[in-house]
Amino acid sequence: MNTGLTIERRPRTWKLTLSYDGTDFHGWQVQPSVPTIQGTLQEALQRITGEAPLPQGSGRTDAGVHALAQVASFELLASIPEENLQRALNRTLPDAIRVLSAEVVRDGFHARHDARAKTYEYRILQAQRKMGVVCSPFLTRYMYACPWTLNADAMQRAADYFLGEHDFVSFAATDPDLATREEAASAGRLGGTATSLPAIRTIFKSQWDRQSCEAGELLVYRVRGNGFVHHMVRNLVGTMVEVGRGAQQADAVPAILDACNRAAAGPTAPARGLFLHSVEYDAGETAAPVATA
């Protein structure tokens, strides 16, 4: 019997975990006329499902920055099995972007708003004293070939000062995460104006490790925090490189933090050495890389 009622399909919330080589992309966020991770993913979803949701990432990685386990969320009306969507996306996306997992999650899940912590990794190839040793062209896209020999112990002393809660305005881009601050202010989550919010973040881990690779010694910085402002990790690394090469003292870091002035900190390290390593959510929702090659 025809009751005259129309049953509408409800959209389902999807969560993707992605790995990508950011070298040939202009960052995560969609921009006109240039390739971006978000835009490329949106186009692939449209080709597969006929729908074009704008995937929301856990963070907006910059041009040239890579990800081992970026997270994106969006809604789809299409009724498609999880493994089928993953397989179809990996057939459609360029080889530089791989979908590690695709799953339907609870309604309302948001890759950025629900993130509890993130870990970034930065890789530096130290200058080699031995003449004739150069960084392989197969590695140079994924690490900073530093022209100086660095004092890793001094860099670790500097890194220790970042632990805990601080205002990281000195390590933010000229305009620290304006889009996020404007969104929060307009939603009433913050007091004051969008331009008055300090860049207060909590860092849980700040550690340098030495690793061997075919080109020599690799210094790997791992930083885990509850959030990061624009260019923050690259500016932390650039400042610690200044310490490692002897142009700055490790114990100057507290004064740099207190200055709340970008000019007080060191230069911005190159994008190619930076990886979004993993994103943490509530129990059962954490995304981690399959491998950290």
Image (cartoon, rainbow, N blue to C red):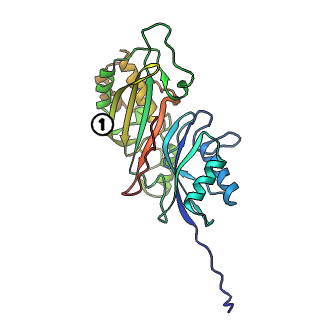
Q: Which residue is mark 1?
A: 163
Q: Nearer the viewer, residue 216 or 230?
A: 216
Q: Is residue 272 left or right of residue 171?
A: right
Furthest toward the bottom, the residue is 1
Identified at 50% across, 33% down, the residue is: 174
Identified at 39% across, 57% down, the residue is: 284
- Asked whether residue 193 appears in the rendered view, the answer is yes
Q: Is residue 144 left or right of residue 217?
A: right
Identified at 62% across, 40% down, the residue is: 95
Question: Residue 86: horizontal and vertical position, in percent?
Answer: 58, 54
Q: Determine whether 249 is above or below 87 in the image.
A: above
- Asked whether residue 263 appears in the rendered view, the answer is no
Q: Is residue 218 left or right of residue 18?
A: left
Amino acid type of disc 1?
Leu
Question: Residue 227: horizontal and vertical position, in percent?
Answer: 41, 44
Question: Residue 221: horizontal and vertical position, in percent?
Answer: 38, 31
Question: Residue 282: horizontal and vertical position, in percent?
Answer: 37, 56
- Under tag 1, what secondary structure? loop
Q: Determine whether 85 is above or below 139 in the image.
A: below
Tell me the crowding category of disc 1: few under 14, some 14 to 19, or many 20 or more residues within 10 angstroms, Cα based. some
Q: Is residue 287 left or right of residue 44?
A: left
Looking at the rendering, which quadrant does residue 251 occupy? top left
How many numbered circles does the render carry? Answer: 1
Identified at 60% across, 47% down, the residue is: 38
Q: Determine whether 8 is above or below 123 in the image.
A: below
